[in-house]
Each structure stands twice: as C-alpha cells, then as structure tokens.
Image (cartoon, coloured by chain):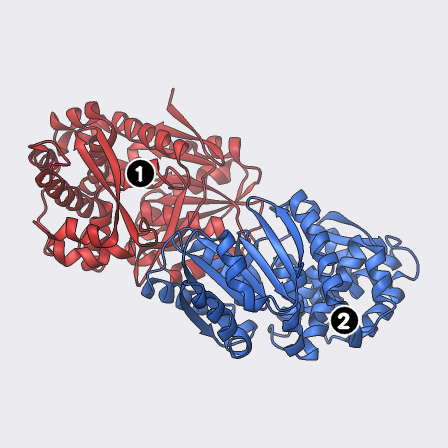
Chain colours: A blue, B red
C-alpha cells in the first residue's frame, strides 16, 4: 500500500512516513536509511507493552542486532537521571558512533532519545517512531531534542534531526482519550498560526472523529511544521511561530510541576490567555478568542487553569525565546495568521499584566 | 603590541589570539565578537584565585554584566553533577540564548563550559580563555566539548566551536611544573603526527625552556590543529590523527580512575605503547619508539604505567572512534607522518596483544 511521505530538508534530509500498520514493517524503512545493523531501541514501559515486541521482531527478523532500554513512562522521566541511565545502557551494549538509536514512544521518549543521540559520543543517528498524536504532529519532527531540569522544561537540549520518522496511525487506537486530547492542543495551534482550512476542518469535527481523520490531520500539521523548520531550523525567527501559546504554557506546566496538566491542555490555556490579551489590546481581530475557545471545546480542551496571567508572568522570563533584555511572543491576528512580537522584558510584563 | 592571531574556519569562524598580558585586555577582545553585554564566567577555584578578578574586572570596567560560577578544580568535576549545577546557575542568573559563556581555566573548565554552551537552551555562544598549556595547545581549539560519565572519559559531548580563544602565555607562570609536563604530552604528539620541525625543536630543548618558547610552541600546535579541524570538523577521518596515543591513554586514565595520572602522561604512555607495537610489526620505522621515548624524557614524560597493553585492550573497545565492529588506530610511520588504520575489533585486540 502507498503511505504518505513528507520530505524534510534541514541539516539532515529525511522522510516522514505516515499511515496505518507501519510498525510491523519497521525494518523495511529503517534499513533503507541506516548505515548500521545495530540498533538501540529506547522506549517507556507503557509503549513497550503495546509495541516493543512488534518493532523488535521486525528488526530481528531482518537480521539486525538490537538492544532495548525501557524506562518508566511520564514527563518525570525526561530528566538527567534517565539520561545518564541511557548513556550507561549504550556503553554496556557497546553502541558506537555509527550505530543508531530508535525512539519508540511519545514526546518524552522522542525528546530524551534524540538528546541522547545528539550527545552520546558527540552524536549518532536516530530514528523517531512516535506513538502519540502529540509526538506525531509535533515533537518527532524538526529536530528539537531536550530534557527537563528542575528550573524548567526543555531548558537543556540540542538540535538533532532524525534520519527517519515513522508515524503509524494505528498506535492511536491504543492511545487513551486523554492523550488524543493532549495532541489536539498542538493540532489546533497549527490551524491558528498557519492554516485557516485546517482550523475550519477542526471546527466541523469533534473528538470522536479524530481517528478517522488522523492521517489527514497529521499530514497537514507535519507539512506546516516542515515548512517552518526548513525556513528556520535553528529557531531564530519564523520557527518561533510554533511557540504560539507556549511561553505561558510552559509556565503553567511548571506551576503544576509538569505532572498536574498535560502539555496540550497547557498549550490550549496558553493560547487562550495570550489571544484574550491580544484581542483586548487590539492585536487580534474581535471575537478570535471566543472562536478559539469554541474550537478547543470540541476537543475537551476548554480547561480552566488555577494560576492567573500575573501569577505566570515572572516564570515566563525563563523562556528560551527570551533574548538578553527582551522576549518574543507569538500573536495570531486572525485564524491562520500569526507573527512574533519582540518586546523589552518590562513591556512584556506590562503587556501580560496590565489591563 | 601585536599578538599572534590564528583564524579557524569551521562551522563558526573564530580567532585564536596568543600572547602575554592578554587577560587584562579580555574585554577588548570579547566585546569585538560578542553580541551581548552579559557574560557568565565559568571557572574552577584554583584558576579563580589567580585570574578570576583580572578577567571580571576587565569586563566590568567595560560595562559588561557578569556573573561567575566557580567549581572545585580537577577532572572529577567534569561530570553530570557539575553540569547540572552550571545549568542551575545560568537559570538563576537569567542567562538567555543571546548571552555568552566564558570558560576561564584548563581543559576541564573548557570542556564542561563548552558543553554547557552547546546544550543550555539548545546552545549559546562561548569564549575560551585557556590557562594551562594543555588547554592552550589542544582542548580550547577545535570545538570538541564533553563531560565524563562513569563508563568513560568524554563519552558525552557535542561539537561546539567557541567564538574566540584567548591564550595568555603569562598564565603559564603560575602553572605548577606538573601541568607544564601534562601539556607537553600533547605538544610532542603534534610533532609526531604532523611536524618534524616541531619535534626536532623539542629534541633540542628541555622542560626548563618551555616558558621561553611557549608562544612559538602554542602557535605551531594550534596551527596544526586548525588545519586538521578545518579539514574534518566532525571527526570522520583526518581529525582522528589527533588521537595518536589516545585510545590507550583513555584506557590508562580509566584504569587510574582519572585521578592517578595526568592526561599528558597517559598520552605519552599511550604513544609509546602503540609505537612500540607498530615498530615491532613493521608499521613504523626502526628506532622510532626509542626516539619518541628520548624526547618524552626531556619533558619528564618517561612514565611507566602499571597496566600492560593486554590489560588495557578491552577497555579500548569503548573508544568513541570505534565504529560498529571495527576500530581505528593512529600510527606514526616516522616523525611527522601519521595515518589511521581501521581494523575489525578482533584484529585490533590481536594487534595489541599478540607478539
């Protein structure tokens, strides 16, 4: 069968393959890009129980040498401690510079595995097999890898493009609804910043329809991300648009210690907060925040978060997008149109907190 | 006065400035390349006591905002624990992506600060101010950054070119003789792999002359390194020559838990071991090992190490230069001429251990 393929040309060129029943064919795709027969699969316990065997069997049957490292699921694992254990595992298994890591899982697995691939022995290849909607539409593409540190999420990381991304939409069948909702936060974001047609599609559907239209949604999101990443791989300008809602979202996640709220819900709340402010201050067209809120509600993303904007404002100053003395925020003027606004830190705090 | 300047064109272009009395002029050089007024100086307690104030005063007097992080000296500090503390310090001081780190110290400070600069917020600029001979001739140039992990030295790292390297030869005046000896291991290596004239110069001098000829030696070593790095920044071929003696040296250092022997002495021992074997097997001209040994003796590098080659052989398999199933070693056929020989792991073990 024909799978959808999207090519990315960044510091490394690679393909994103999208479709169902892909995991069982892992070896076919992996072997076409890898220069080794030796793979270290990194995954979490949940994903491993569903798909670990399928992926490893495909590789073993094709004659590959594989080893597998499994860590406990959850954002708390995306830390220095897990990273050191991964390094240790790679050493024990004599993984060399020309071998290849495979990230099998959601955003946490992809981010930390990618970061390990960027840094172990000063870098080796890795392949993304994202198994959550969030990872499929967002984190597996574009080469941002990271770990969290106590001071904040993703504050340590590297740009490292994968050699291949395999998006098997069948994995969404085992994904709890909460994780579908999580991913929809980013999907709505793509519509808001770059695609009125995508946003309008989302306005006609609800959460129950997602699996049916997953392939199309993933393809649209990934295409948008591809365009943005190709224009600005190292996040100096255009790529910041992908951060719509994220500066506040990161503060919200920090407020909840990264455990009390999903990334998608935090992004949804962040997008609404910044759009509410932008609309009141005349940066966005009238009614945009209501329209965004209504769309988010279709996907159970109408969350109320505890902290108020003024409570979150200071934590925003640790945002990676801050440059010396100023900070960039992303504002949508209307659905599908976004831009970054750079302002001095003091103005930013006023922008967030003054009526 | 005129300082020697060597330009490096790698993924970033930068200058290495060499001369005496440079530290007091830090700000002049730093400000000409930095796009920020905010600098985080990272150093160790020993270097800080000698030069911390001089560097910080120069920057402060020029209107820069500076913060300084000092960690305990020694290779044991080049670890994940220190790295996390550096990240934390950078967060607390609100260092942003457009700010700049300054590594003030020897190889440990340079390597870990460079690695922090490669990874904090996915990368920011950094400047090297090497204060040991070893760092001046070797580790501060070329963009290799790393930390040690329990399984081995430099096994985690990144390629990250500095924006500027300031080599103040006056810092050698406060450097204990042991550290001069340490640096001479690498200086002799440069002669062996690439420069008969440098090696011949070293054969006419002794340890006591070094400070007098430091500027010339540093310039020659850095020029060799520059040429090699420009030809092969990411260490896929030519750059491996710089690793002459290092595969065994890393095993020796590991044998002594990184504390019982200096890097320079380990490299000296590693060069002698591999040259002894290479000579016996006909890869090197007759008498080369004796000539190398005699030169090393002039700089008190005629060390006998406890472990034998067979005892070290297995630990060599964790070498970063190993590729799947094979390993590359560097051999000098004569003074100033070197090449890499790639061999399957089994052959490598035989090469090292069989008569």
Between B36 and B59, the one lying in front of the other is B36
Question: Which residue is painted at 67% across and 43% down in the image?
Answer: A231
Q: Residue furthest right?
A: A286
Callout in the foreground (1, 2): 2
- The residue wearing badge 1 is B138
Residue B280: which disc?
Answer: none
Rendering quarter of residue B56: top left
Between A1 and A338, the one lying in front of the other is A1
Left or right: A220 with respect to B221?
Answer: right
Left or right: A334 with respect to B323?
Answer: right
Q: Chain of mark 1?
A: B
> Does B173 appear above or below B215?
below
Question: Which residue is painted at 51% across and 58% down in the image?
Answer: A30
Q: Secondary structure at mark 2?
A: helix
Query: Which percent across, then down, holds residue B236?
Result: 38, 41
Q: Quadrant of the C terminus of chain A?
A: bottom right
Q: Secondary structure at mark 1?
A: helix
Q: Residue furthest top?
A: B2
- The residue wearing badge 2 is A212
Q: Quadrant of the N terminus of chain A?
A: bottom right
Disc 1 from disc 2: Cα separation: 58 Å
Query: Which percent across, then down, holds residue B16?
Result: 40, 30
Q: Chain of mark 2?
A: A
- Tell me the crowding category of disc 2: few under 14, some 14 to 19, or many 20 or more residues within 10 angstroms, Cα based: few
Question: Which residue is painted at 55% across and 53% down in the image?
Answer: B121
**Can residue A323 be seen here?**
no
Question: Which residue is painted at 64% across and 78% down in the image?
Answer: A174
């Amino acid at each position: 069968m024909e799978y959808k393929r999207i090519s990315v040309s960044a510091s490394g060129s690679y393909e994103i393959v999208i479709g169902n029943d892909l995991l069982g064919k892992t070896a076919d795709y992996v072997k076409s890009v890898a220069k080794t027969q030796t793979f270290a699969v990194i995954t979490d316990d949940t994903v491993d129980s569903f798909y670990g065997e399928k992926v490893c069997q495909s590789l073993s049957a094709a004659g590959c040498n594989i080893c597998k490292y499994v860590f406990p699921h959850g954002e708390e694992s995306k830390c220095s401690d897990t990273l050191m254990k991964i390094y240790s595992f790679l050493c024990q298994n004599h993984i060399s510079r020309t071998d290849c890591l495979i990230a099998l899982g959601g955003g946490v697995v992809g981010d930390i595995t990618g970061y390990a691939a960027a840094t172990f022995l000063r870098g080796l290849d890795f392949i993304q097999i994202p198994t959550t909607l969030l990872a499929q539409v967002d984190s597996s593409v574009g080469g941002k890898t990271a770990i969290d540190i106590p001071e904040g999420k993703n504050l340590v990381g590297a740009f490292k493009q994968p050699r291949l991304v395999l998006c098997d939409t069948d994995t969404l069948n085992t994904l709890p609804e909460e994780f579908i909702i999580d991913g929809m936060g980013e999907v709505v974001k793509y519509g808001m910043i770059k695609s009125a047609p995508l946003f309008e599609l989302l306005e006609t559907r609800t959460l129950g329809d997602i699996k049916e239209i997953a392939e199309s949604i993933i393809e649209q999101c990934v295409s948008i991300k591809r365009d943005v990443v190709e224009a600005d791989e190292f996040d100096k300008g255009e790529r910041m648009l992908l951060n719509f809602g994220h500066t506040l979202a990161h503060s919200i996640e920090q407020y909840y210690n990264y455990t009390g709220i999903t990334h998608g819900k935090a992004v949804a709340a962040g997008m609404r907060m910044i759009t509410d402010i932008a609309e009141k201050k005349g940066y966005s067209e009238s009614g945009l925040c209501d329209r965004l809120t209504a769309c988010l509600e279709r996907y159970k993303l109408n969350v109320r978060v505890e902290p108020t904007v003024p409570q979150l404002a200071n934590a925003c100053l640790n945002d990676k997008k801050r440059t010396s003395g100023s900070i960039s925020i992303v504002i949508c003027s209307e659905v599908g149109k976004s831009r970054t606004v750079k302002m001095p830190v003091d103005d930013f705090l006023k922008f967030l907190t003054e009526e």
